[in-house]
Image (cartoon, rainbow, N blue to C red):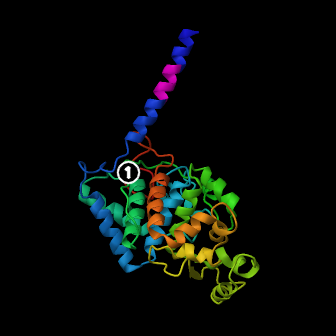
Amino acid sequence: MASSYSFVFLHVLVIFCVARIAFSDLSDDFYDDICPQALPTIKRVVEDAISQERRMGASLLRLHFHDCFVNGCDASILLDQTATIDSEKTARANNNSARGFEVIDRIKSEVDKVCGRSVVSCADILAVAARDSVVALHGPTWEVELGRRDSTTASRTTANNDIPTPLMDLPALIDNFKKQGLDEEDLVALSGGHTLGFAQCFTFRNRIYNETNNIDSTFASQRQANCPRSGGDSNLASLDPTSALFDSKYFSNLVSKKGLLHSDQALFSGGETDELVKTYSTDLRTFSKDFAKSMLKMGNIKLLTGNQGQIRVDCRKVN
């Protein structure tokens, strides 16, 4: 019995130590010695891309989000379709919607050039580009923990199942985030990423034509002008009034029943997230702080570290 107990204790200790080692492989100074110019190079390319198209900041932030929600933050979203790769780019949430891949390609090329070899993972590039995009649009900053490795697989099926949809109600959203180890505060804070960017007509058509209880009628009419009942599926509408500025107007809109997506307005619909939405709508500092905290938490979902995965030479394909 004692021998059996000792074995079990040792087994648990080994698992704990491995977990600690995997976590300790991440640090905010991971590239300081092997390539000190890596992060400044990412920042430069991101700022240049956003200066050319303000919408790109939201697109890069979304890439990181959609990557992390599918088997962790491992750059699987960047892999193109092949005979052995079931690309996530054609999943419902990403098909003809996810964008910014060319910017990631450029970052990877520039970073590998200054580093002299391929030492920075595509997964880390996504995480840093998301942070730098938010900062470029006057949002908060945070120290991105680095040392992620890139996956050698992708899953369109998992992307279809795990990326939250614009039609979800609050219980579904809470369950979806809980599956990723994220709580209700993370849900509200990260949804605030919709302070940036646009959505396509097909994602909010049902809301502006068929919902009546939790939508401002004037707002619905205004959105209908650019989103007909049929056709115009890819017509864009901003997710909040200042689509290229990180502020709290997204939450003010929710309080005024002007959330563009059903899943947005679900956060302020008489449920348990109402109070936090109200707080964020009038307190940009608290929202910014919580957003940064939740981004760090999301960026640590199911990581590949150490000798797991690989450092891709081309972010679009496995080495």
Q: Which residues are magenta?
A: 9-15
Crowd class of label 1 (few under 14; some 14 to 19; many from 20; radius 10 Å): many
Residue 259 seen in render: no
Picture quarter containing residue 159?
Answer: bottom right
Residue drawn at point x = 41 percent, y = 69 percent: 139
Q: Is 168 drawn above or below residue 23 in the view shown?
A: below
Q: Is 230 drawn above or below residue 153 in the view shown?
A: below
Left/right of residue 173 with respect to residue 247 in the rendered view: right
Which kind of residue does numbered mark 1 sit on? Glu
On the image, the x and y values in percent for residue 248 come to: 50, 73
On the image, the x and y values in percent for residue 36 come to: 24, 54
On the image, the x and y values in percent for residue 118 come to: 31, 52
Q: Is 253 drawn above or below residue 297 in the view shown?
A: below
Residue drawn at point x = 71 percent, y = 75 percent: 214
Q: Nearer the viewer, residue 189 or 32?
A: 189
Residue drawn at point x = 69 percent, y = 79 percent: 215
On the image, the x and y values in percent for residue 81 come to: 54, 59
Residue 33 seen in render: yes
Residue drawn at point x = 26 percent, y = 60 percent: 113
Q: Nearer the viewer, residue 257 or 210?
A: 257
In the structure shown, which secondary structural element does the residue marked by tag 1 occupy?
Answer: loop
Whether the magenta-drawn stretch holds residue 12 is answered as yes
Q: Is 254 drawn above or below residue 188 in the view shown?
A: below
Picture quarter containing residue 106?
Answer: bottom left
Left/right of residue 198 with respect to residue 43 in the rendered view: right
Q: Nearer the viewer, residue 40 or 182?
A: 182
Q: Dominant secondary structure of the magenta stretch? A: helix
Whether the magenta-drawn stretch holds residue 92 is answered as no
